[in-house]
Image (spheres, rainbow, N blue to C red):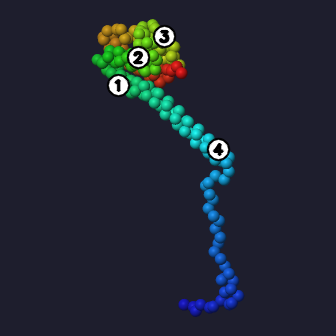
Amino acid sequence: MEPTTKPDPITEAALRSLHDIAMPEPVSWMLQTWGWAVLLGAMVAMLALAGLRWLLRYRADAYRREALALLVVIEERLRRPETRRDGILELGEILKRTALAVWPRAEVASLSANAWTRFLEEHDLDGAGHALERLLDDFEYHGSEVVADLPSNVCGDLVAAARNWIERHHVPT
């Protein structure tokens, strides 16, 4: 080890006069002007309104989610020829129940045949009413043997048309 030498007096005085590095104060997150506070308040209000609107729409569309869940069960029945007739009847029933969830009972409950298909077409945004018209006019009133012989692609088209109508039907405001 090498002996330490004592620095000269001028160096000692210079070392004693050194101070730590001065760090600035952390930047405050508090808003500095009223304009920013107003802007933040407006943004919070808009987010709250958007959230409320989403919640109301989500709750209002609960009937659609329920109908689509039931449609999955009906689709499974339509795949098997022995339960196809029941599936066709349930498909018509789920469409009627969906309409009853939105429109007044007096307006929808008594509709059948041409009036019912016309109602579905009037409230259809994407033109799924043609496949549904075939369901309601033809298959719903046939015997089990006719419906059991339906090709699976026809049943798939019916389910797709019903799903399309449930998802996209026009709701009066």
Q: Position of residue 140 (x, y in %)?
A: 37, 11
Residue at the spot x=33%, y=10% of the render? Answer: 146
The amino acid on which the numbered mark 4 sits, given as a three-letter code, is Leu
Residue at the spot x=67%, y=48% of the render? Answer: 34
Q: Residue furthest left?
A: 82
Give the residue pinned by disc 2.
96
Circle 4 or circle 2, nearest the eye: 4
Q: Is residue 119 visible?
A: yes
Circle 4 or circle 1, nearest the eye: 4
Q: Which mark is residue 39?
A: 4
User: Element type at marker 3?
Assistant: helix
The answer for how far apart the CA atoms under marks 3 and 4 are is 50 Å
Q: Which mark is residue 63?
A: none
Between disc 1 and disc 3, whose residue precedes?
1
Q: Mark 3 Cα within 10 Å, few/some/many (few <14, many 20+)? A: some
Q: Mark 1 Cα within 10 Å, few/some/many (few <14, many 20+)? A: few
The amino acid on which the numbered mark 3 sits, given as a three-letter code, is Arg
Q: Position of residue 32 (x, y in %)?
A: 66, 53
Circle 2 or circle 1, nearest the eye: 2
Give the residue pinned by disc 3.
118
Whether residue 84 sits left or right of residue 120 in the image: it is left
Q: Mark 4 Cα within 10 Å, few/some/many (few <14, many 20+)? A: few
The quadrant where residue 23 appears = bottom right
Q: Position of residue 156 (x, y in %)?
A: 41, 20
User: Element type at marker 2?
Assistant: helix
- Do residues under tags 1 and 3 come within 8 Å of each other at their CB atoms? no
The answer for how far apart the CA atoms under marks 4 and 1 are is 50 Å
The quadrant where residue 24 appears = bottom right
The amino acid on which the numbered mark 1 sits, given as a three-letter code, is Val
The amino acid on which the numbered mark 2 sits, given as a three-letter code, is Lys
